[in-house]
Image (cartoon, rainbow, N blue to C red):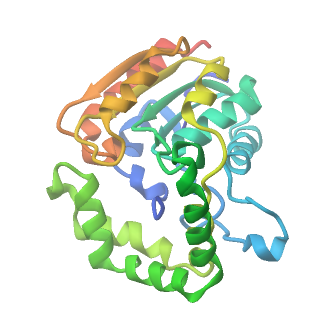
Amino acid sequence: MVLEQTGQHQSHFAYSDHWRKNIPVLAQSHRVFSIDLIGYGYSDKPNPRELGVDNFYSFETWGSQLNDFCKDVIGDKAFFICNSIGGLVGLQAAILEPQLCRGILLLNISLRMLHITKQPWFGRPLIKAFQNLLRNTELGKFFFKSVATPEAVKNILCQCYYDTSQVTDELVQAILLPGLEPGAVDVFLEFICYSAGPLPEELLPQVKCPVLVAWGDKDPWEPIELGRAYGKFDTVEDFVVLPNVGHCPQDEAPHLVNPLVESFVARHANV
């Protein structure tokens, strides 16, 4: 999500409607945009093989897209409010063109535990072989079909939400439908096989703007015990624990996230 302060000149299947509980509240006093990055949601999904480009779906691509949006649509600096993998995109964008970012709020940023450098050396050839199998055989499409169902999406969401009552049929459909768009399977397979690129601990020291890290303490995918290390970086002003919240705080606990966004923006409105 991209947020610009008014008066001053922000997986997987996730997409822009995952911020539907935040936009109406924040839009009362700010200009707010929720973006489907290329390959996700209802944005275009070009097949990188047809483009002849390796690692087209990368943080560099998405970071550049975010910056272009700021220049072409917003026309000014903005705050980047990011969840999970989106946090890498926000950090990358702020590094590529620091003059465009007022500040970044990271919600349960992905630790990228499947990154190739975090795997034992003896397991890396096996990981590469499995990725090639997914990308180049029917196994990948079969795997995608197995997770692109209402039952599978609900099961995945119930894993990462601590308060499973928030996993409604409306949410399941909102997450599922963009994943059924033409080309979604190619993007899905491309990204789950993307085990290179930057890590949060590599990007955070390079960021010049204020950064706030917040973490749902019941996240089973990105353990808060590991996430706390990000609070020690000089660029991070604070590490906020969101109690009894899972991986997607903006949707599971908007009553905690929305005030956090508003206070962060107010502190750095003149950056």
From where the camera sits, is residue 170 visible?
no
Q: Quadrant of the rendered structure where residue 176 is?
A: bottom left
x 50%, y 51%: residue: 114
Which residue appears farthest toward the front when viewing the image? 122
- Position of 1 with respect to 202 (left or right) is left
Which residue appears farthest toward the right when viewing the image? 52
Residue nearer the viewer, 37 or 232? 232
- Which quarter shows the C terminus? top right
x 25%, y 41%: residue: 253
Measured along the vertical axis of the image, is residue 196 above or below residue 30?
A: below
Measured along the vertical axis of the image, is residue 269 above or below residue 67?
A: above
Percent of width and height locating residue 207: 64, 22
Measured along the vertical axis of the image, is residue 171 above or below residue 255?
A: below
Q: Quadrant of the rendered structure where residue 150 is?
A: bottom left
Residue nearer the viewer, 50 or 224? 224
Percent of width and height locating residue 122: 55, 53
Percent of width and height locating residue 171: 31, 64
x 44%, y 83%: residue: 145
- Position of 176 with respect to 34 (left or right) is left
Percent of width and height locating residue 186: 62, 75
x 36%, y 38%: residue: 25
